Image (cartoon, rainbow, N blue to C red):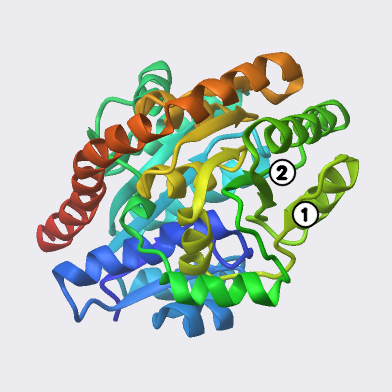
């Protein structure tokens, strides 16, 4: 028997999704230590080992149905799962598991989800039909509420909260110092983090980012540090952009835990990120950010926390982002103080997701 099934983009070696899962489990167990939790994962063995919970193959229908037969609450999330921007197949997977959970009589919660965009006509119709059957939806930013409205999803209880990863804590500074040494990174200079992924228009924006990093070295006297969030793709991108620079940059070449990645970002003076959870990590640690938008979820988060973006990467202009980086660099102490105050409310909202889930579990 299980109390809770958690479904999401788990077991794919993505730091952001690993962070979401870790935070959800930690928050739920802080409210009820003896919860019996099972995860739908691409890599069940690794998930079991990393999080101390049971896990089954997310693509094994018989295993999924078996755990649904013996569970009470189905959690979809967190993350942006209800979207077809990645693929229709991905959207159909999440809608199908939600539908199966309802058929099996489980309570269903969308936990701190990002919603949309859902673009296909049939996709929108199916999404509206399935999601209107869930019990509770919590959202990690306001933009997702607008997408729910456009999909005519009105029946479930809906609340705008915040991303669970805002609760996570970084590894201590002494551990991070040893990681710098392992990577042969030595610098007395302030560091600026870059968390970049490949997307449409990469050839152009990769050159722009390389030019920006060179500008920041020459203008602010910083050390650019490229921090991959998803392996191996982000590492390839980091090495490529660093090779296009005329100044020297550091690239973190190994895969690190969520806490270690948080610890690295905690030592940055600023983070420029395409990866949503690089920006979430930074904001949670009061590190000023500049977002580089490739997906509406990034823009939605930046608007929710009132932090700047340099616009969409497909139209990224070097002079524009140089000017913005200079403004943020100059105001970074003020921004840190603002983020410290804002994080009190954000963390409370993030924790509220777990309270809602436990309430739903109790109201069987």
- The relative height of residue 206 versus residue 32 in the rendered view (above or below) is above
Q: Residues within 10 Å of mark 1 (few under 14, many from 20)?
A: few
Query: Residue 30 placed where, x, y %?
Result: 19, 70
Query: Residue 311 placed where, x, y %?
Result: 61, 19
Q: The C terminus is located in which quarter?
A: bottom left
- The relative height of residue 88 versus residue 264 in the rendered view (above or below) is above
Q: Is residue 135 left or right of residue 172?
A: left
Q: Which residue is mark 2?
A: 197
Q: Nearer the viewer, residue 176 or 83?
A: 176
Residue 253 visible in this rendered orientation of the protein: yes
Total labels: the figure holds: 2
Disc on the earlier residue, 2 or 1 = 2
Q: Nearer the viewer, residue 317 or 328?
A: 328
- The relative height of residue 320 versus residue 281 in the rendered view (above or below) is above
Q: Residue at x 67, y 39 (%)?
A: 86
Q: Is residue 34 left or right of residue 66?
A: left
Q: Which residue is mark 1?
A: 233
Secondary structure beneath label 1: helix
Q: Residue at x 52, y 50 (%)?
A: 268
Query: Residue 57 placed where, x, y %?
Result: 57, 73
Query: Residue 69 placed where, x, y %?
Result: 36, 72
Q: Residue at x 10, y 57 (%)?
A: 363
Q: Nearer the viewer, residue 277 or 250?
A: 250
């Amino acid at each position: 028997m299980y109390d809770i099934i958690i479904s999401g983009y788990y077991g794919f070696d993505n730091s952001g999704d690993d962070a979401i899962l870790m935070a959800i489990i930690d928050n739920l167990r802080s409210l009820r230590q003896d919860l019996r939790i099972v995860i739908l994962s691409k890599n069940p063995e690794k998930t079991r080992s990393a999080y101390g919970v049971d896990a089954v193959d997310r693509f094994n229908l018989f295993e999924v149905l078996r755990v649904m037969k013996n569970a009470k609450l189905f959690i979809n999330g967190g993350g942006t799962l209800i979207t077809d921007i990645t693929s229709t197949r991905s959207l159909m997977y999440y809608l199908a598991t939600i539908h199966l959970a309802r058929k099996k009589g489980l309570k269903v919660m969308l936990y701190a989800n990002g919603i949309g965009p859902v673009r296909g006509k049939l996709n929108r119709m199916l999404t509206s039909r399935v999601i209107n059957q869930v019990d509770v939806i919590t959202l990690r930013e306001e933009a997702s509420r607008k997408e729910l409205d456009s999909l005519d999803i009105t029946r479930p209880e809906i609340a705008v909260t915040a991303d669970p990863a805002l609760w996570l804590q970084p590894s201590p500074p002494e551990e991070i110092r040893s990681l710098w040494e392992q990577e042969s990174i030595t610098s007395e200079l302030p560091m600026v983090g870059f968390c970049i992924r490949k997307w449409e228009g990469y050839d152009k924006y990769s050159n722009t980012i390389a030019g920006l990093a060179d500008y920041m070295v020459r203008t602010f006297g910083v050390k650019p540090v490229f921090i991959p969030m998803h392996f191996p793709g982000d590492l390839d991108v980091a090495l490529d952009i660093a090779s296009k620079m005329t100044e020297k940059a550091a690239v973190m070449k190994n895969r690190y835990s969520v806490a270690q990645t948080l610890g690295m970002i905690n030592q940055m003076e600023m983070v420029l990120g395409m990866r949503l959870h690089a920006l979430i990590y930074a904001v949670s640690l009061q590190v000023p950010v500049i977002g580089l938008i490739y997906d509406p979820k990034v823009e939605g988060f930046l608007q929710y926390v009132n932090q700047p973006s340099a616009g969409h990467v497909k139209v990224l202009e070097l002079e524009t982002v140089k000017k913005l980086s200079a403004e943020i660099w100059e105001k970074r102490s003020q921004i840190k103080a603002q983020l410290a105050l804002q994080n009190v409310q954000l963390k409370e909202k993030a924790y509220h997701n777990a309270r809602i889930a436990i309430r739903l579990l109790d109201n069987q």
